[in-house]
Amino acid sequence: FSGLVCADQADLLINACLVMTCMILSSSCARGAQESDLNAPPAKMNHRRFRAVLKKLRRKKIRQKAAQERDRLLKVEVEEVAVSLGQEEQEQKERERQHVLWLEREAEAQREFELRCRLEQERAALLAERSNTTKATESLEQVLAQLPKVSSRPATPQEESWHNPPAPRAYAPAEPCPFYLKTGACRFGDWCSRSHPRPAVSRTLLLRGLYSHLSLEQLHSDDSLETDERELQAHFEAFFWDVLQELRRAGTVCQVRVCRNIEPHLRGNVYVQYSSEEEAQQALTMLNGRWYAGRPVSCEFSPVDRWKTAICGLFFRRTCPKGRSCNFLHVFRNPTDECWHESRSPPPQRRHPQSSGTKKRRRSRSPHRSHKRSRTTRSRSRSKTRKKRHHNKSRSRSRSRSKITPAHSPQSKHR
């Protein structure tokens, strides 16, 4: 083919070549059939059939070109979509990066602005303080200028009379509180007019308010009436064995007393007496800072050493006139008398009953007790005076009999 043939002519020539190829193939097939069958007539393709085959090949070529063009356009479109998606993703990443950079710049600008504002405020406060100091100094100088000048000579006693007198070197010691010395607690507490000398070390420990029960609380309602004595005793026994097991870890426990008073300074107090001061010190270190029944344990040394002066003697006789409001100890009876009779406290010094300078121990200020004591003292004094009178009379009679001479005795007998 020459180069001057146009594209349409080239297509027609290609189609003609294809038709000729088909005819050759068909003739070869016919020749083969003739060889196989010598009696069959030879096949011939007329012009109409040739035109039909040519049109069919042309339509096929057109469809192939359309399909190729469609595939090419689809491929181009897919590539364009992929490129556009990649560009959008890159643009999104770039926008996010720019946004992060903008946030960092904004935060830095905010910090610089806050720093600038703080520096300005500090500068303004410093200037205000300087101005106030200057004004105060000027006003002080004006006041000092208005005051009269003081001479350098020493002041006379009359000029120094406006000073306060010196404080006394020693104050009068306060009298110790007897209730604190006997029971280790005072209902006035720190407001007491007398002193409460706390011992530096002692064999007796005081655990304030360790035992609690509904019947010991001072409630406005009648909740405390719902418990009876047996329930209270059972609750105390459970508490006693629980606490005693822990107290014996520090040493030998000699005495355990649990108060059942309702006064705030004695309510639920537990007194524990050890055999030595070292064991008491160890128990104090072990118990302080711990918790029991949801409350902190407060442990301290107590001056109580003699239980006869601390416990109310009328409580176990059920004759105490003050009831549970007594300022002396009303204690529970320990179960099985555990830690009850093992007192190792030093025995009290007995005084002569006829000594005149002794002071009698008073349990309480009950008028019933004072009246009873006054009656007993009166009866004792009356009996003493009667005995004294009788003794004097007997002595006078004996003296009068001894004065009679023996010479007069027969006359008297005769008479």
Image: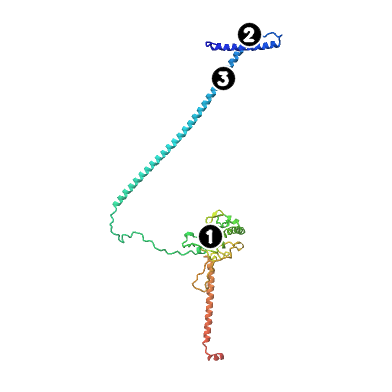
Q: Is residue 37 left or right of residue 78?
A: right
| Measured Cα–Cα span from mark 3 to mark 2 | 33 Å
Label ID, residue 48: 2
Q: Quadrant of the N terminus?
A: top right
| Label 3 Cα crowd, 10 Å radius (few <14 / some 14-19 / many 20+) | few
| Measured Cα–Cα span from mark 2 to mark 1 | 132 Å
Q: Is residue 401 left or right of residue 34?
A: left
Q: Quadrant of the C terminus?
A: bottom right
Q: Position of residue 163 (x, y in %)?
A: 34, 59
Which one is in front, 179 or 151? 151
Give SS at disc 3.
helix
| Label 1 Cα crowd, 10 Å radius (few <14 / some 14-19 / many 20+) | few
Q: Nearer the observer, disc 3 or disc 2?
A: 2
- Residue found 53% across the figure and 75% down from its top: 382
Give SS at disc 1.
helix
Q: Nearer the observer, disc 3 or disc 1?
A: 3
Which one is in front, 292 or 181? 292
- Residue found 54% across the figure and 82% down from its top: 394
Label ID, residue 282: 1
Residue under numbered circle 3: 70
Q: Position of residue 265 (x, y in %)?
A: 52, 59
- Residue found 54% across the figure and 23% down from its top: 77
The reply to whether callout 3 and callout 1 are in contact (CB within 8 Å) is no
Callout 3 amino acid: Arg
Which one is in front, 282 or 78? 78
Is residue 316 placed above or below 140 in the rendered structure?
Answer: below
Callout 2 amino acid: Arg
Give SS at disc 2.
helix
Counting residues from the start of the chain, the first of labels 3 and 1 encountered is 3
